[in-house]
Image (cartoon, rainbow, N blue to C red):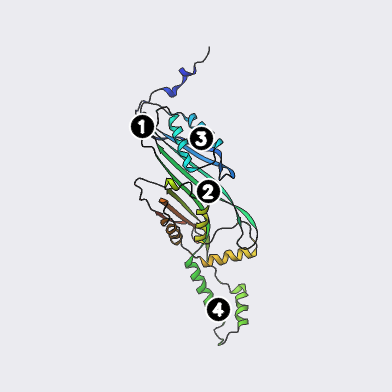
Amino acid sequence: MTLTYDVLDVAKEKSQNNLTIDFVGIQGLKIPIKINNQWTVPARLSVFTSLDDPHARGVHMSRMYLAVHDYFAQQTLKVSELKKLLMKIVKDQKGLSFSSRIEISFDWPIERKALKSSILGWRYYPVFIRADYSQKTDDFECVIGAEITYSSTCPCSSSLSRELIKSKFVEQFSKKEVISKESAVEWLENKEFLVATPHAQKSTVNFKLKMKLDAVDEFSILDCIDKIESILGTPVQTAVKREDEAEFARLNAKHLMFCEDAVRKVGAYFKQEKNVLDYMIKVQHDESLHPFAVESYIVKGVEKGWRA
């Protein structure tokens, strides 16, 4: 007997609940994409469409996959061009859907030079892009984000460490009215008298930006990453020599910060960016003093209904 697959297609059956669905689709799809006309990187994608026909049992998942596969096989990632992909995803559903969404995340490789020496190493920055399209209104909007790792040294711990070192110094030389330069230098060089050091921790800042559409392609995520690392002042390093590690220690002492300080620094930067409509910033310090992390957030949120 020859099978008739149209007869066996249960996807064509009608829904018994007659409800529309906001988003349905594929989560965790892995596809290589080309970025910046330079790199092809493995990306993780999620693609969704609405199910606006309350009687239809489901959407055409394979058509969604093929649309994404074919698009990135031919295109370098360009955020504004994602509208064309989202329009095709809706069109391929043959009237079942009126809106679509794609989420893209990948690690952007950047070769970084050490702070002082000529050593080079690779840093990988997680990048996030989300785009939404509505056929009914022809609306298209996008969110761009990234994660940056840096070092944060606690201002309170630094202050307490200085106080303990000062007390030890006073104790050591309390009976001397005059302290020679040589004696002070010898004391500073003796590791036994370094009685305290401030604690530092690996920290991260995550941000997501809703951009003006006419400026989204001119926006450089790499320039943004560089700017934030410069603002915070303590980027983590790859391979280092002694002079690089010494410079890293100096920068940590210069840029003491609580997580509240860090999120405000980044927030002040985005607040003055005229092409950023909305933003969400999350800073996390993985405490070395405590068995937990601390976090702080700033959300602009002026666009009604927008969520990062």
Q: Nearer the viewer, residue 21 or 115?
A: 115
Q: Tell me which amino acid carries mark 3.
A: Val
Rate crowding at label 3 as few (under 14), some (14 to 19) or many (20 or more) other CA atoms within 10 Å: many
Residue identified by numbered label 3:
68
Residue identified by numbered label 1:
20
Rate crowding at label 2 as few (under 14), some (14 to 19) or many (20 or more) other CA atoms within 10 Å: some
Q: Is residue 232 above or below residue 63?
A: below
Residue 43 visible to an observer of this rendering:
yes
**Secondary structure state at the residue bearing disc 1:** loop
Residue 202 visible to an observer of this rendering:
no
Q: Say whether disc 1 or disc 3 marks the residue closer to the N-terminus.
A: 1
Q: Nearer the viewer, mark 1 or mark 4?
A: 1
Q: Tell me which amino acid carries mark 4.
A: Phe
Residue identified by numbered label 4:
169
State the separation of the CA atoms marked 3 and 2: 21 Å
Q: Nearer the viewer, mark 3 or mark 4?
A: 3
Residue 284, position as x, y percentages in the image: 47, 55
Asked where in the image residue 53 lies, by quadrant, the reply is top left
Q: Nearer the viewer, residue 266 or 214?
A: 214
Q: Say whether disc 4 or disc 2 marks the residue closer to the N-terminus.
A: 2
